[in-house]
Structure formats: structure tokens, C-alpha cells
Image (cartoon, rainbow, N blue to C red):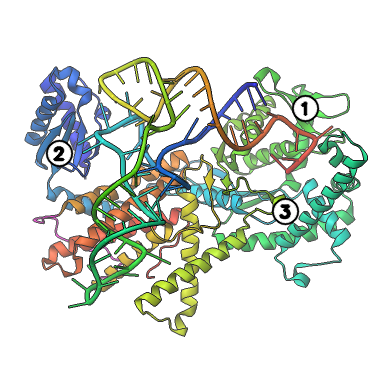
RNA sequence: GGUUCCGUAGCUCAGUUGGAUAGAGCAACAGCCUUCUAAGCUGUGGGUCGAGCGUUCGAAUCGCUCCGGAAUCACCA
């Protein structure tokens, strides 16, 4: 069934041609949902035709409106305000349209090369924090949105399991750890290793201060580099790269602890991966690429032996690719990983979900790949997102202001429980012992719903603010509001006596429906367009804000319509179908955000 | 200093390829639970869309110039 917009676009082109003798494209006809304040369902903007009509905007609108009404039986009335032609569409159209919406299938799978999306990319020296949460939620959600748009998607993680930062934790553990393990300490593995990273940092600071008092006037960075502790960490990294067995064994042991910790956090967050890359497996490939580049003469070697990409003629600087001691840097590893990934998947697009602090890094990465002659480097898209800030500014591990991912998730579930129990107490509902486990699950899902929605509803490019003291809300424009609306819809369907999962049949003729119902149908119809746009812009925020509008619109409808008590059986069936379709759309959308859609709450 | 991004109500955020009197939530105030879930609904107050200039029938949206904030320009990752 053609949508009313399609029909009217076609007719409007003819109208403009016949009335004013001017040619237009159907795509040039703009429609919008009629503003609540005016009479009508959809609005045609007539300003573009005023010139050709040589009439006032109102008169132009009236003429087009008259033409449309005469030629389209579904237009029952129209009015013009300034250059806006408000059209009323027949009840019959909306009633039928909902029916086609419900029966519409999913977008067809595109038979193309996969889209590879990297997200999370943790370092193995400390546990995940709030910034990682934004990253993980974004990456997972964008992957699901792309899938829903018909793409084949591969989710990958790149673990930064090597580098001087890991050596710092290892060193501190050797020196001050007394053989502590996750089992002996009761700490999650990633937290345990993170603890030693902090211990290292504290000792490093002490030594740096000492160095500075001993050598007044020395640069702080230089002082830090010269501390015995830092020298040792660097030496350890060199040993690691040389394959020293003792170091490698310790490294494997501590990484195993960390992975167990990460897995638990990922499971709680509800994110997963199709493939995990480790930098320890790819940095050598990166080094060999640099070697090739050197042989081809596109990279340069300095006198001290370090290797660089010279990007000065492109308006950038020189970029280090290998240190003078021959060890690799971040960029070197990323070159290798990118190449390996391209080989593994032959992707049509390589998406990297990485914070905007690394915009420059990805700019350089693409340029270096180009320099090295890898055409597929152009497929790389950096999905850059803004920082999560605290009221006092950026999170700083040294100042202990980092919001830990595990702590935050636990706190969310607790707050959900407190809120829920308050509500239940107010309603006088008691919880039976046998419901206890179910309630635990629900409160966890609501806590996560609140957290996920809070983060995903914000446009990814923007920095966002998180205030731990005013913990995330459960009322208003929130995840739990959407979850609540879904639960209420499902409950309503169950109580109506119909199978909530079976398509409710209704007669498509002879029903009178309200403006709220028409508005709701229009909102539901917009879902595919929103989904498409969210896929193009990599923006779960579009889905989130759409769902809120939808749920709010539904609540308005639900509030003043006694669906279950309607006496006209056919009208009741139609309304239930509308309720059902809202529930289906809500659930689909919530899934894209990784938010559960509870049956009851 | 160079480059990139951001600036909308007291606070947190929406605002579609440029369209009507710029919208939500939180916070404040006033109503609505003997009837389908009140984590809800309805209403009130709250705005120089950072500033200015330009393009346009029409600008929060596009362009230019400023102002403010952030990130980055590391032999860290």
C-alpha cells in the first residue's frame, strides 16, 4: 500500500504542472506532520511554488489543496495557514495503513561484504570505567542498528595487551604484590591488576619528586623518564618484545586475570564480540609494514635509528612509527591490526568506535596507510564520540575521580531496587519469596535500562556530563519509562484476552478514529526512516529520542481512551492492534539500544 | 600558536534535506489513582538558540568574523 505522502507527492507534482504550468520533482515536495496547534494530519509546504503560482502563499495553498482534495478520495478537508497547507486524511486511510504497517517485513539482508566495527578496545592494566561504558554501548548499538538495516556486521574488540602500561602493573605486582591473586584477595582480576597500576603510579610520583629536588630545573617529563622505576618498566618492555620467557609467563598470568574480569563486565553490560584481536599478535605485522615502507622509500629513518612518516607536506607533522630501540608504538600496532582485519574480513567498511581525543590519530593512520599504498585504508571510518565528563571536569585516575564500570552498574541496580520498592510499598504490593529472583532480574534490567538510555540518548559527537551525586533518573525521559510503557502494553494485551504475540485482526472499514490514534500511526510509520537514518549517521540517539516520542504519544492516547472497555468490538480490535504495534516497535527499538523490554514490572 | 569538535530554559538534553508561536525531562508550583500498571497523565511559570554580519520568501539549522569551552599536535596507549 502506498503511503499518503507518496500519493500526495505525485498528485502535487501534477497540480503544480496543471495549475501553474511549472515542473517539479516529486522529491521536492516537502511534507511534515501537522503541528498539534492546527487542524489536519499532514502538511505540505507550499512556499517553493509561490513564485511559479504568482499568487500569495495562502492562495497557492488553497489552489493546491483544492486540487488534491478533488483528486484524492482520502483527503477530507484542508486549510492553509501562511504557506502551510494542512490536509486532513480520512479515517479509512489510517485504519488501512496501520494494517499494512503491521504486516510489513523486515528490511532485506544486503548480500554484501561485511561491515567490521571495533569497539571497547580496553587496556589490560586497569578495569573499565564510565568512558568505556559509553564506548561499549555505542559500538554494540551501532552494530545492531546496522544489522537491522540489513548489513552483515562483525563486532571486533582489540585488546591493548602489550606496552609499557602493562609492564608498570607487572613491575608493581612483582615488587609489592606478595603473590596476591584474585582468589587470595577476592578481587576481580581487572581490579587487582588495576590496583598495582595505581601502586606503580604512586611510587613513580614519589621518585619523580625526588628526581626533581635533586635536579632543580629539570622538565617533569624528563624527570619521570629518568626515574629508576620508569627505566625498569622500559627495560621490561624491551625484554617482553625480545620474548623473555619469565616476563612472558607473568604477563600471560596477569592478562588471564584481567580477561576474566572483563568478561564479567561485558556480560553485565550485555555486549559481545565476534572476534577479539590482541595487539601482541599484530604489532609484528605493523613493524613489518613499516619495514616495507622503509624499503619502498616512503618512510624515513632518523640518525638515531627511529623510523618516521613524514606528513609535513600534507600539513601535518612527522609521526613516529618505531622508537630508536626498535620497539613499536601505538600507530605501528594499529597499522598491523588494520591490515590483519582487512585480510580476515575483506570488509566494505571498517568502523572504529574510539573517543574524539584520538581524531588526530585516525587522521594520521589513514594517511600513513595511503602513503604505504594500501587502498583499503579509505574504508576506515572513525566513529568518534565525545568524552563523559564529571561536574568537576574530566575523570582523572590520579585524583581518584574515575567512575568504575562495575561499581556504577551495581549502583544502578541498587537504585532501581530502592525506587521499585518505594513504589510497591506505596501501592501496597508485597513481594513473595518465590518472586524474589525475578525481581532481582527486573531491578537489574531497569538499572541498566536507565544507564544505557541515559548514555545513548545523547548525540555521540557531543561531550556529555554525568553527575554521580544526582544519580541517573528513573522518571521522565528515561529508559525505565520506555520499559514501563512496554510492560503496560503487554499487560494490556494479556488482560484483553488476546494472545499478545498473535496479529490481532480487525475490520478495516467503517471505523471512526481520533486524532491521537492518527498521530500514533504516523509515528509508528516513521520507524523505518528513523532506523535508516540512525544507520547512516551511526547514531543510537536518533532511535532513543524517537522511542521517547513514541512512548509519550502512546501514553497520551492510552490515557484518554478506554481501550478495553470500548463497546464497538471492531473499534476495540483496531485499538488493540494499534497498542500491539506500538509494543512491537518499542521492543524493536529497545533491542537496538540493548535495553530489555520487560513483560511486566 | 596550528588543527578539529562543541555552545539551545536554572540543570541534563531533543530539534529531520533550512519551514508555522524553538520542544522534552529534571527542579518549582497546581490538579488527576473504588475502572485496563501513577516509574504515568494534565496544566502553570521559565529562552537575546554564545555575539554580530551575510544568503533566503523563511535561519537554532547554511556561510564569514569574533567570544567562550573541550580535545589534540608525545620515543603514552
In this picture, residue A27 sits left or right of residue A463? left
- Is the magenta region chiefly helix, strand or loop? loop
Say which residue appears at 74% left-offset and 50% top-offset.
A161
x and y, in percent, of residue A445 in the image: 48, 65
x and y, in percent, of residue A253 in the image: 79, 61
Q: Tags 2 and 1 in contact by the CB under 8 Å rule?
A: no
**Residue farthest bottom in this picture:** A433
> Which quarter of the image is occupied by the N terminus of chain A?
top left
Could you tell me how far apart the alpha carbons at marks 3 and 2 are, in whole angstroms?
Answer: 60 Å
Could you tell me how far apart the alpha carbons at marks 2 and 1 are, in whole angstroms?
Answer: 65 Å
The dot on residue A87 is 2
x and y, in percent, of residue A189 in the image: 72, 63
Q: Chain of mark 1?
A: A
**Residue farthest right in this picture:** A214
Residue A526: quadrant of the picture: top left
In this picture, residue A414 sits left or right of residue A290? left
The vertical placement of B2 against A557, above or below, is above
* Among the two numbered marks 3 and 2 on one chain, the one whose residue lies closer to the N terminus: 2
The dot on residue A308 is 1
Residue under label 3: A124
Q: Chain of mark 3?
A: A
Say which residue appears at 13% left-offset and 22% top-offset.
A56
Amino acid at each position: 500500500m502506498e503511503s499518503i505522502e507518496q500519493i500526495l507527492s505525485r498528485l502535487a507534482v501534477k497540480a503544480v504542472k496543471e495549475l501553474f504550468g511549472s515542473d517539479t520533482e516529486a522529491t521536492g515536495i516537502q511534507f511534515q506532520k501537522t503541528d498539534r496547534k492546527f487542524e489536519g494530519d499532514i502538511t505540505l509546504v507550499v512556499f517553493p511554488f509561490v513564485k511559479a503560482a504568482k499568487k500569495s502563499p495562502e492562495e497557492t495553498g488553497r489552489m493546491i489543496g483544492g486540487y488534491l482534495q478533488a483528486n484524492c478520495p482520502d483527503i477530507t478537508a484542508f486549510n492553509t495557514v501562511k504557506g502551510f497547507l494542512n490536509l486532513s486524511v480520512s479515517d479509512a486511510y489510517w485504519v488501512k495503513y496501520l494494517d499494512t504497517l503491521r504486516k510489513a517485513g523486515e528490511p532485506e539482508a544486503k548480500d554484501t561484504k561485511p561491515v567490521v566495527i571495533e569497539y571497547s578496545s580496553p587496556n589490560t592494566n586497569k578495569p573499565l570505567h564510565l568512558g568505556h561504558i559509553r564506548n561499549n554501548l555505542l559500538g554494540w548499538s551501532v552494530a545492531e542498528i546496522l544489522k537491522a538495516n540489513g548489513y552483515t556486521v562483525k563486532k571486533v574488540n582489540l585488546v591493548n595487551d602489550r606496552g609499557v602500561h602493562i609492564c608498570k602493573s607487572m613491575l608493581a605486582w612483582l615488587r609489592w604484590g606478595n603473590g596476591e591473586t584474585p582468589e587470595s584477595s577476592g578481587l576481580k582480576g581487572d581490579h587487582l591488576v588495576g590496583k598495582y597500576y595505581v601502586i606503580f603510579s604512586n611510587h613513580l610520583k614519589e621518585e619523580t619528586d625526588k628526581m626533581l629536588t635533586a635536579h632543580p630545573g629539570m622538565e617533569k617529563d624528563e624527570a619521570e623518564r629518568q626515574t629508576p622505576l620508569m627505566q625498569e618498566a622500559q627495560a621490561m618492555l624491551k625484554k617482553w618484545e625480545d620474548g623473555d620467557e619469565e616476563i612472558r609467563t607473568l604477563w600471560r598470568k596477569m592478562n588471564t586475570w584481567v580477561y576474566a574480569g572483563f568478561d564479567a563486565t561485558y556480560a553485565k553490560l550485555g555486549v559481545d564480540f565476534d572476534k577479539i584481536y590482541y595487539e601482541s599478535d599484530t604489532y609484528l605485522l605493523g613493524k613489518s609494514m613499516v619495514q616495507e615502507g622503509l624499503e619502498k622509500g616512503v618512510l624515513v629513518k632518523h640518525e638515531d635509528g627511529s623510523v618516521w612518516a613524514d606528513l609535513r607536506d600534507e600539513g601535518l607533522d612527522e609521526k613516529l612509527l618505531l622508537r630508536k630501540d626498535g620497539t613499536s608504538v601505538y600507530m605501528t600496532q594499529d597499522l598491523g591490526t588494520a591490515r590483519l582485519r582487512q585480510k580476515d574480513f575483506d570488509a566494505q567498511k571498517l568502523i572504529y568506535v574510539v573517543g574524539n581525543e584520538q581524531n588526530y590519530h585516525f587522521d594520521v593512520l589513514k594517511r600513513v596507510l595511503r602513503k604505504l599504498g594500501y587502498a583499503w585504508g579509505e574504508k576506515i571510518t572513525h566513529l568518534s564520540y565525545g568524552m563523559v565528563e564529571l561536574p568537576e571536569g574530566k575523570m582523572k585516575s590520579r585524583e581518584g575521580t574515575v567512575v568504575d564500570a562495575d561499581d556504577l552498574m551495581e549502583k544502578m541496580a541498587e537504585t532501581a531496587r530502592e525506587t521499585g520498592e518505594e513504589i510497591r510499598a506505596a501501592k501496597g504490593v508485597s513481594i513473595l519469596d518465590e518472586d524474589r529472583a525475578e525481581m532481582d532480574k527486573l531491578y537489574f534490567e531497569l538499572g541498566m535500562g536507565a544507564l544505557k538510555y541515559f548514555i545513548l540518548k545523547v548525540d555521540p559527537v557531543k561531550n556529555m556530563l554525568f553527575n554521580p551525586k544526582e544519580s541517573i533518573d528513573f522518571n521522565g525521559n528515561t529508559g525505565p519509562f520506555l520499559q514501563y510503557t512496554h510492560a503496560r502494553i503487554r499487560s494490556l494485551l494479556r488482560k484483553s484476552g488476546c494472545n499478545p504475540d498473535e496479529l490481532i485482526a480487525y475490520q478495516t472499514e467503517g471505523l471512526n478514529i481520533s486524532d491521537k490514534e492518527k498521530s500514533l500511526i504516523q509515528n509508528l510509520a516513521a520507524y523505518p526512516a528513523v532506523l535508516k537514518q540512525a544507520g547512516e549517521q551511526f547514531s543510537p540517539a536518533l532511535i532513543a529520542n524517537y522511542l521517547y516520542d513514541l512512548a509519550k504519544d502512546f501514553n497520551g492516547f492510552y490515557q484518554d481512551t478506554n481501550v478495553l472497555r470500548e463497546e464497538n468490538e471492531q473499534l476495540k480490535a483496531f485499538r488493540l492492534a494499534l497498542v500491539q504495534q506500538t509494543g512491537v516497535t518499542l521492543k524493536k527499538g529497545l533491542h537496538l539500544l540493548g535495553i530489555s523490554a520487560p513483560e511486566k514490572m
